[in-house]
Image: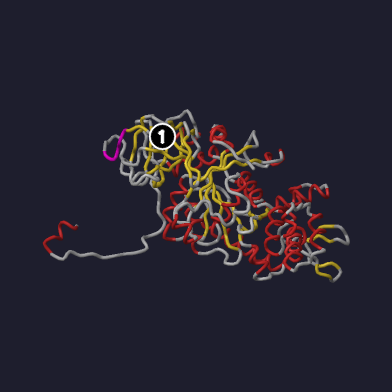
Amino acid sequence: MVNFTVEEIRGLMDNPANIRNMCVIAHVDHGKSTLTDSLVQRAGIISAKNAGSARFTDTRPDEQERGVTIKSTAISLYGELAEKEDIKDIPVKTDKNEFLVNLIDSPGHVDFSSEVTAALRVTDGALVVVDTIEGVCVQTETVLRQALGERIKPVVVINKVDRALLELQLTKEDLFQNFSRVIESVNVVIATYYDKVLGDVQVMPDRGTVAFGSGLHGWAFTLRQFAGRYAKKFGVDRNKMMERLWGDNFFNPAAKKWTKNGTHEGKQLERAFNQFCLDPIFRIFDSIMNFKKEEIPKILEKLEVKLQGDERDLEGKQLLKVVMRKFLPAADALMEMMIIHLPSPITAQKYRMETLYEGPSDDECAIGIRDCDHKGPLMIYVSKMVPTSDKGRFYAFGRVFSGTARSGIKVRIQGPNFIPGKKEDLFIKSIQRTILMMGRYTEPIEDVPAGNILGLVGIDQFLLKSGTLTTSETAHNMRVMKFSVSPVVQRSVEVKNANDLPKLV
């Protein structure tokens, strides 16, 4: 278990190349909070047996009761890439293999869309969760559109694969076609909102930007993982193997050759993805769910899965959960995908600066934001207020884009209507405390450098919802968030007495 302390998190904060700020977005009930659990469990915050059902990021009593996420919740996780080879795959130069992942779990209901907007503003990457059975739904499209509008890079998880196997009893080829359809639908949305600065962010399994899995059972895989396994086994190049594992590639066992042609001497060949990725999973499901007692040990030995004492007595779904979790732990697949493919604040703030900052793009604040400079002028964007356990008090939740936030420093609190040079909507106050948001808990922390997400105590009286905090007197505001959804309910009111009309208007 990786139980890490606030000091260790603070140590990781100083290296922005190794930070990933990301949020989990999806249609309602596609399994965001459940998938988040797997990641939280990996960081040693909840026990493995609760992952999938604890819904750690559903912090409010009403969320736990109803099983619905209402507010977005932030949590900082520690991630590492086990192999040195993996670090080479990160597009930007990275030294250490320890990473700080600031994860925000957001709601899926359209009514809570403003929470998603607030979460997207402070992150650079998004994990888009799609239900394999329902496919891309309305809200998936809405949140993806919001993310791309904020120049946020997406990676995709196709969730609830267990249902496709257990309830729908799909064949391997059907499942492959199902996955292809979902990925195509996501890419259609991404292509519609193409942004030249962000570049091509379409997701492809053979590039490693799509994972498949089940949040409830706690397992997931990417083609990169399977390619790595087979590369070791057969002594071939991992990247070449990865390209072959998707699309119309077939392995001909008789000729021991790869081919694009699906038939050999009149016989149908099996698609590489089905043969190398789905086959082991289907075998595990088949032997465990059909109680084939003698087959199970053989399969487990082949896959190098070892069961501990009590686990040997399990059967049915309980055993399936344990085996799949050991064979393909969800946290490993998702962490690896997020760390390699999502940008660090250093990379992201370069191209997000123009969409984030209202002022000229060459003043000191813009340059501080662009370079993610912890020595630059302080620029914090507060995206929302979070209620504390004290009645009527709030934490301000936001992100440091430039400079370093410390307890006790005097800052200019600029509300959304602030105009540089005027005194309206401007307060000069000091930050009482800086805190780290950890799901259900908060931890005090001395200072927070650029590129990190934080909570602030003591400024809730001066900001209503969102705003900019800065130490620079020439700073313009960070751009106000665009809320994508028009109000859900409309109500018309009129005065009883016509004389009172001027008061109402």
The residue that appears at 57% across and 67% down in the rendered structure is 134
Rendering coords of residue 363 (x, y %)? 41, 32
Rendering coords of residue 43 (x, y %)? 60, 44
Rendering coords of residue 329 (x, y %)? 67, 52
Q: Main secondary structure of the magenta part?
A: strand
Residue 425 is a magenta residue: yes
Above or below — where is 24 with respect to 421?
A: below
Q: Quadrant of the C terminus?
A: bottom left
Q: Quadrant of the N terminus?
A: top right
The residue that appears at 49% across and 30% down in the rendered structure is 374
Nearer to the camera, 409 or 499: 409
Q: Quadrant of residue 475?
A: top left
Residue 5 is a magenta residue: no
Nearer to the camera, 43 or 12: 43
Which amino acid does the dot numbered 1 rest on? Arg
Nearer to the camera, 49 or 455: 49
Instruction: Give the residue at the far top of this rendering.
Output: 375
Mark 1 lies on a secondary structure that is strand
Above or below — where is 482 with respect to 432?
A: below
The residue that appears at 66% across and 55% down in the rendered structure is 220
Left/right of residue 25 with respect to residue 380 in the rendered view:
right
Q: Which residue is mark 1?
A: 433
Nearer to the camera, 200 or 290: 290
- Magenta-drawn segment: 424-428
Rendering coords of residue 179 (x, y %)? 65, 63
